[in-house]
Image (cartoon, rainbow, N blue to C red):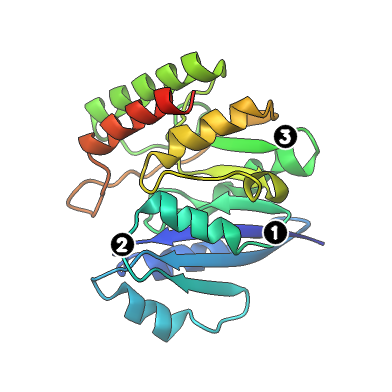
Amino acid sequence: MQTLSIVIPVFNEKETLLQVVERVQAVEVDGLTKELVIVDDCSTDGTRDVIREHLEGRDGIRVIYHEGNLGKGAALRTGFAHTTGDIVLIQDADLEYDPRDYPRLVTPILEGRADVVYGSRFIGGESHRVLFFWHSVGNRLLTTLSNMMTNLNLTDMETCYKVFRGEVIRDIEIKEDRFGFEPEITAKLASRKLRIYEVGIHYDGRTYDDGKKITWRDGVRALWCIFRYR
């Protein structure tokens, strides 16, 4: 049986992390066992206490701690290095993305049609929380510019849900420490001429009051990364 490695980068998510882990573990994906790789990026809100009390030592869960706050890209870099799965999937530690989408995300890879799958918030008929207009404009702008540099036709380059064949993602050097990971990995995947698919996903976006962390500065960095890694 093949293994699905789920990498969860964590920073100050004590209110949602356990719910996310429960949702991930509740999902059954035919033909796959699951391993969770949780990377705590030096949380300061008590998340580490939650991890140590409820998650450390549980079967199927591996925990890695950063001794300093390095960023999401750095946490993913660490997480990928600790995966063993045939398929690797990124899961945020908040409640924006629904693990019930896993079966549709992994199907193109399991069927041998894809090397990489992006979960798009902008295609398909799945439910989406209505939130920030300018965020959606920014996402589409960055995706368009990325597509111009990579010659892909993605609709959602900035999505969290990215799924890879294990040997693909473990063979790519990741340099970006923060949210620049998204355009960097997209450019590097495109340069390898890999088979990339998109599927529609659910999305329950958070507000800044809910703990959303990405800002306009991350958008500027993403723009710079699009041209850097083209």
Amino acid type at circle 3 is Ala
Q: CA distance from mark 3 to mark 2?
A: 34 Å
Amino acid type at circle 2 is Asn
Q: CA distance from mark 2 to mark 1?
A: 26 Å
Q: Residue at x 47, y 28 (%)?
A: 229
Q: CA distance from mark 1 to mark 3?
A: 16 Å
Return the residue at label 2.
Answer: 69
Q: Could you say whether the residue bearing mark 1 is in a helix, strand or loop? A: loop
Q: Are marks 3 and 2 in contact (CB under 8 Å)?
A: no
Q: Residue at x 72, y 34 (%)?
A: 114
Residue 4: where, in percent of width, then height? 67, 57
Residue 45 lies left or right of residue 54; in this view the side is: left
Amino acid type at circle 1 is Gly
Say if 131 sits above or below 138 in the image. Answer: below
Return the residue at label 3.
Answer: 114
Residue 194 lies left or right of residue 53; in this view the side is: right
Q: Could you say whether the residue bearing mark 2 is in a helix, strand or loop? A: loop
Return the residue at label 1.
Answer: 85
Mark earlier in primary sequence (3, 2): 2
Q: Could you say whether the residue bearing mark 3 is in a helix, strand or loop? A: loop
Asked if one can make out residue 198 in the rendered structure from this viewpoint, the answer is no
Badge 2: how crowded within 10 Å, few (<14), some, or many (20+)? some
Q: Residue at x 30, y 34 (%)?
A: 221
Asked if one can make out residue 217 in the rendered structure from this viewpoint, the answer is yes
Mark earlier in primary sequence (1, 3): 1
Residue 113 lies left or right of residue 72; in this view the side is: right
